[in-house]
Image: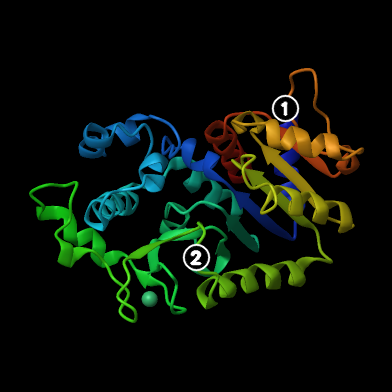
Amino acid sequence: MENTILQISQWLQEADAIVVGIGSGLSSACGYNHYNTVPFFSDNMKPFIEKYGFKSLFQGLTYLYSTPEEEWAYLAHYIKLMYDTPIGKPYRDLFKILNGKPYFILTTNVDMQLDKLFPENNICHFQGDMRYRQCQQPCNDEVYSNDNIVKMIDELDDPTKLPSDMVPRCPDCGRVMTLWVRDDHFLEGSHWQQQIARYRSFLETYHDNKILFLEMGVGDMTPNIIKLPFWKMTAELPDARYVIINTKGVENKSALTELCQASPTCCAHGGGKRPTIPLQLQGKALAYDEDLAIALHQLSHKQCDK
Ligand SMILES: [Zn+2]
């Protein structure tokens, strides 16, 4: 393992630019797991656990509430929790690792962790961002800040129900608003397009240079956003390299297993092992199977030593 860390550290040093792909596993490594019962959830969402029996933050996001007052009470508490949650150490370690290099972050996370530390122009929120809401239709191209939502909930008698006049509605059509987070109504408008354009521009700027694609905490639900494009670009660009940290973080491997079976040149898995890196990337790719919090701590120290 020490050799792998040294090699990743060397690749980071040698890279002209770093493209980081971040999924929910990185927040889970901070203790901020959105998909399971963890203290972060049960300590902060007690009224909703008691009322609905939720077992995770995500369950409350997809629950079909009887009224918008109840739905937005949950959303407002979830949003406030995201604003109030301190930056996890793995994110701070990543910040140290990237310091001094051109980098760009493509993320499926919507939980504001990256936004507390990294410049806005270096991030593409592909699946949305809990700092914003949108018209549910949507009838317009706007995303609206959720800053004011947080202030609403401090003095509620019943924390699980907002007064009707506090439920956010679209200023244009009057419809109840929804979080700017990927679902069937997700607004891929100018706010989203600008972020995609920044990501493409970064790739175009550095595609002839030594790009290192660094994947962390990406599960199997949406491999088409980070994992597969990273594999493809690493294969196609002559000087590109690819690093994945913590393949153990993959919780549901069935989708990726199918994907691998569909490709004759993929993968170094089987016999109970999880997929790591495609065979065609050998020599250009490294997998480090270590807890993300530990791996980033180790890497940040290696970077500081240099
Ligand atoms: Zn509207």
Total numbered labels placed on residues in the image: 2
Quarter occupied by residue 55: top left
- Amino acid, disc 1: Arg
State the separation of the CA atoms marked 2 and 1. 34 Å
Rendered image coloring scheme: rainbow
Image quarter where ligand 1 lies: bottom left
The x, y position of residue 59, in whole percent, is 40, 40
Is disc 2 placed on a helix, strand or loop?
Answer: loop
The x, y position of residue 60, in whole percent, is 35, 43
Q: Is residue 234 above or below residue 205?
A: above
Q: Is residue 277 visible?
A: no
Is disc 1 placed on a helix, strand or loop?
Answer: loop
At label 2, counting other C-alpha atoms closer than 10 Å, the crowd grade (few under 14, some 14-19, many 20 or more) is few
| Image-based side of 99 in relation to 154, left or right | right
Q: Is residue 294 above or below residue 195?
A: above
- Amino acid, disc 2: Pro
Q: Which residue is mark 1?
A: 274
Q: Is residue 65 visible?
A: yes
Q: Which residue is mark 2?
A: 119
**Residue occupying image coordinates x 65% and y 60%:** 101
Looking at mark 1, is its residue's CB closer than 8 Å to ligand 1? no
The nearer-to-camera label among 2 and 1 is: 1
| Image-based side of 47 in relation to 222, left or right | left
**Residue occupying image coordinates x 17% and y 63%:** 164
Q: Nearer the viewer, residue 204 or 156?
A: 156
The x, y position of residue 8, in whole percent, is 72, 41
| Image-based side of 252 in relation to 211, left or right | left
Going from N to C along the chain, the mark reached first, 2 or 1, is: 2
Quarter occupied by residue 133: bottom left
At label 1, counting other C-alpha atoms closer than 10 Å, the crowd grade (few under 14, some 14-19, many 20 or more) is some
